[in-house]
Amino acid sequence: MKKIIIASLCLFSTLPASVYAEDTLALAPLTVTATRSELDSRLVSSTVITRYDIERKQINSIEQALRGIAGVNVVNSGGLGKNTSVFLRGTESDQILVLIDGVRAGSATSGGAAWQHIPISEIESIEVIRGPKSSIYGADAIGGIIHIHTRNAIASKSAINPVFSVGTGTYAHYKVQGGVSGAVDKAWYNTHLSYQQTEGFNSCAGALGYGCFTNEPDRDGYKNYAGSARLGYHLTDWLSLEAHALYSGGQTDFDGDYVNEADFAQLIYGGKATIQAMDFWRIDLTGGVSEDDSTNYLNGMKKSTFDTQRVSFSALNNFTLMPEHLLSLGYDFQDDSIDSTENFAETSRYNNAVFIQYQGQLANNQFILAYRSDFNQQFAQNSTWNASWGYAFDNEILVSASYGTAFKAPTFNELYFPDFGNSNLNPEKSQSYEIGVSGEHINWNWSLNGYLTYIDDMITYDSSIFAPNNLSAARIMGLEAIVGGQFYGFDMLVNYSALDPKSMDSATFGNVLPRRAQQTFRLDIDRQFGYASIGTTLNVEGRRYDDLQNNRQIDGFVTWDIRAEYQFFEQVTLQSTVNNILNTQYQTVAGYNSPGVTVFFHLRYEPTL
């Protein structure tokens, strides 16, 4: 039997930095998340952000990492540590499945992930999988999946690899982080800690009634303590085990009438067993817990707490029937529960699911077929399916087409929040069509994808009953273009998205869905000069509306970032970046400020032992 290499769900999180340097601009990398298998497929539109990208581009937050990526819209309410929402292919921010090391993350009450509290210092890679994936992952994956992998050392060639870094910048922003990782014989490990704080700036722009109801002319600060750990071991040539954990906690200040500060804590932990039962049969057993806790205050007085927990387990069987033909059979379980000072009518529910997927290749044709049946404690049975086909020409150009259905169960807030929830809500459902063409060449790659999504029974606020209701339908059309590669010694990557997200509800028919920029463009250019490097990022976002009635328009904007670094003695690296060098005054949420010119210096020490 082959010696098994355990795994994180994303292969790229296991690659060393030297591989990142060579392959960082690949547009169609192998992403295990996309098909829950390691069989390479170019039929799924995806982007991988590696640790190499994070360090080279001097990224300080999830928002910076995702902003401008094809199909992604990010909105923020006032800077680092403030409420952040991510929209994927025009779908709602809670219609994205968020995984952290394979564990379903996010709040059971709100339905979304606390993006602002996920520490970029603890991340190894981020996979952005575009398009519906409910056929293999169940609820929430209407727009796609964002899978975050914490730091890993499975591919390390040394027993001890320490790293330490400090940074400081505008708005009294300070960072310190350090850790050690390595691999010894059949074991690998990683542990990493980080702390950052900023005094911030006044989040509220003073436009009262635009969501920022109280303008407190003060600086809204943020503190974050974080840590991650991973331990794995090859017990035999057919069995490997791995455990992982991520913690993020701290305090954030903001402007508000009812609450204006919060303590938060996120804890995600779990494990995985990989069993090579036979040469053609691999079993992955995974389980984990995601805890999302927050305590809210008004001027130091405690007002409310929301503690949620998600427990999940998965059993996946992958059968290699013959080369390039893989059959996957799986079972998923999830249990959500909440503990809050608010009196929710229901505080827990569970979901069981089974799924089947077939991936194959015949001559130049590639195809994926998947079906899944979910049984929810409240909403009974929901079925979803997906079909994808592609034809690969001899010149490495692939044309593809796909269709998929997806659904999302209402959140606890939508169903049961006191004096607000509606327990009669139905799940949201969608149908998506996509066509694409892509090319992989020696020094550059490109892709062009168009998609059309219909969402039925969208949950929106119904003023006639003062509660959420299944009132709306939506039609989302979009186009995504990505080009990247090496040109005359420059590493270049271009992302462009055009989006037409429209309401189909009778009361707001034809209106643009709120907070989605209708056009986005991002250009990254980097160049290495021996021990030094320079780079720049240009980000352009078109107009958006802050409300479904389209009464509040938010203007588009342009930001320009520049960066540089120099490596001393192959162990010490000094980095500096100037973000928003044009000092653009812009908003992504009406009434909330965004950072002006920000300068940050970063010193990293990685001794070789």
Image: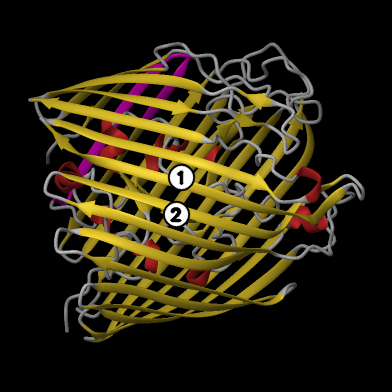
Residue 160 drawn above or below residue 262: below
In the structure shown, which secondary structural element does the residue marked by tag 2 occupy?
strand
In the structure shown, which secondary structural element does the residue marked by tag 1 occupy?
loop
| Magenta span of residues | 158-176
| Viewer-closest of 495 and 603 | 495
Q: Residue at x 24, y 40 (%)?
A: 484
The x and y percentages for residue 210 are 74, 25
The x and y percentages for residue 240 are 28, 73
Q: What amino acid does circle 2 point to?
A: Arg
The x and y percentages for residue 537 are 33, 26
Residue 437 drawn above or below residue 84: below
> Which label's residue is closer to the chain start, 2 or 1?
1
In the image, is 389 to the left or to the right of 39? right
Q: Which mark is residue 496?
A: none
Q: Residue at x 27, y 68 (%)?
A: 391
The x and y percentages for residue 209 are 79, 24
Which residue is tagged 1? 71
Which residue is tagged 2? 130
Task: Report the colour scheme.
Answer: secondary structure
Q: Are marks 2 and 1 in contact (CB under 8 Å)?
A: yes
Q: What amino acid does circle 1 point to?
A: Gly
